[in-house]
Each structure stands twice: as structure tokens, then as C-alpha cells.
Image: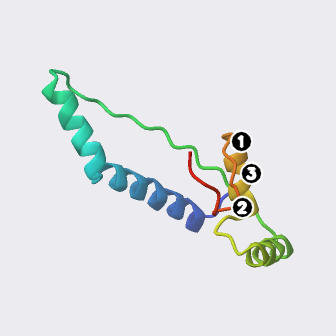
């Protein structure tokens, strides 16, 4: 699939945003500091894979309708991704916690 320049620029911006978010994360900074206090230097390298699927207007519209009907924050793509990670979303939020 050939990407136009606008999409390439957006992907570049996404990469920069991910890098900036990780770089400015206080949680990460605290853990890195703790590791350094134990006598180690830290080199953090992350790899991000960005996948694009072209969506036609009818598919996008049906996903929006399905999302509205479910009243949930997740799209079908989100649910597929979570399922691939073996994460399930329970619909009953009133269940007691273990």
C-alpha cells in the first residue's frame, strides 16, 4: 500500500509523540533512577510497530454505530487487539473484586 505524504508525516508525529511521552514519564524516570542507584546504567530502547488498515466509509460508520450501541469505550479493533493479548473485558462492573 502506498502512503501519501500526509499519512507519512502523521506516522512520524506519532513516533515523536510516543518518544516524548516515554521520555517525560515520571514513572519511568523513577524506575531508571532506582536502577542507577543500584549501580547500573540504563539504556532503554523501544520498538513500535504501527499498522495501518484502510477503512472504507461504510465499515467506519458501522463500527461507530456498534460502539454507540454498546456504550463502551472500545471499538471492535480495540477488542480484537485486547483479545490477541488474551485480555477480556467483562461487562459486569458490579462483580466483587477478589
Q: Which residue is drawn at 40% across and 59% down?
A: 17
Q: Residue at x 84, y 70 (%)?
A: 59
Q: Where is residue 90 in the image (x, y as percent from the top left)?
A: 70, 56
Q: Residue at x 65, y 57 (%)?
A: 95
Asked if disc 2 and disc 3 are in contact, CB closer than 8 Å, the reply is no
Q: Which residue is drawn at 86% across and 75% down?
A: 58
How much space separates mark 2 and mark 3, taking CA atoms?
16 Å
| SS state under label 2 | loop
Residue designated by label 3 = 80
In the image: residue 6, left or right of residue 89: left
Mark 1 crowdedness (10 Å alpha carbons): few <14, some 14-19, many ≥20: few
Residue designated by label 2 = 91
In the image: residue 79, left or right of residue 33: right
Nearer mark to the viewer, of 1 and 2? 2
User: In this view of the protein, can residue 2 be seen by the observer?
Assistant: no
Say whether disc 2 or disc 3 marks the residue closer to the N-terminus.
Answer: 3
When asked about the image quadrant of residue 56, the answer is: bottom right
| SS state under label 3 | helix
Nearer mark to the viewer, of 2 and 3? 2
Residue designated by label 1 = 84
| SS state under label 1 | helix
Say whether disc 1 or disc 2 marks the residue closer to the N-terminus.
Answer: 1
Q: Position of residue 97 (x, y in %)?
A: 56, 51
> Nearest the camera: 55 or 9?
55
Asked if disc 3 and disc 1 are in contact, CB closer than 8 Å, the reply is yes
Can you say which quadrant of the picture contains the C terminus?
top right
Residue at the farthest top position: 39
Q: Where is residue 32 in the image (x, y as percent from the top left)?
A: 24, 36
Amino acid at each position: 500500500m502506498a502512503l501519501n505524504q500526509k499519512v507519512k508525516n502523521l506516522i512520524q508525529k506519532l513516533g515523536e509523540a510516543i518518544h516524548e511521552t516515554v521520555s517525560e514519564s515520571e514513572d519511568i524516570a523513577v524506575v531508571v533512577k532506582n536502577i542507577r542507584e543500584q549501580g547500573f546504567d540504563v539504556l532503554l530502547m523501544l520498538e513500535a510497530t504501527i499498522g495501518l488498515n484502510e477503512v472504507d466509509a461504510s465499515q467506519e460508520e458501522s463500527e461507530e454505530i456498534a460502539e454507540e450501541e454498546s456504550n463502551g469505550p472500545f471499538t471492535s479493533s480495540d477488542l480484537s487487539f485486547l483479545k490477541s493479548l488474551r485480555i477480556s473485558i467483562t461487562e459486569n462492573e458490579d462483580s466483587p473484586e477478589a
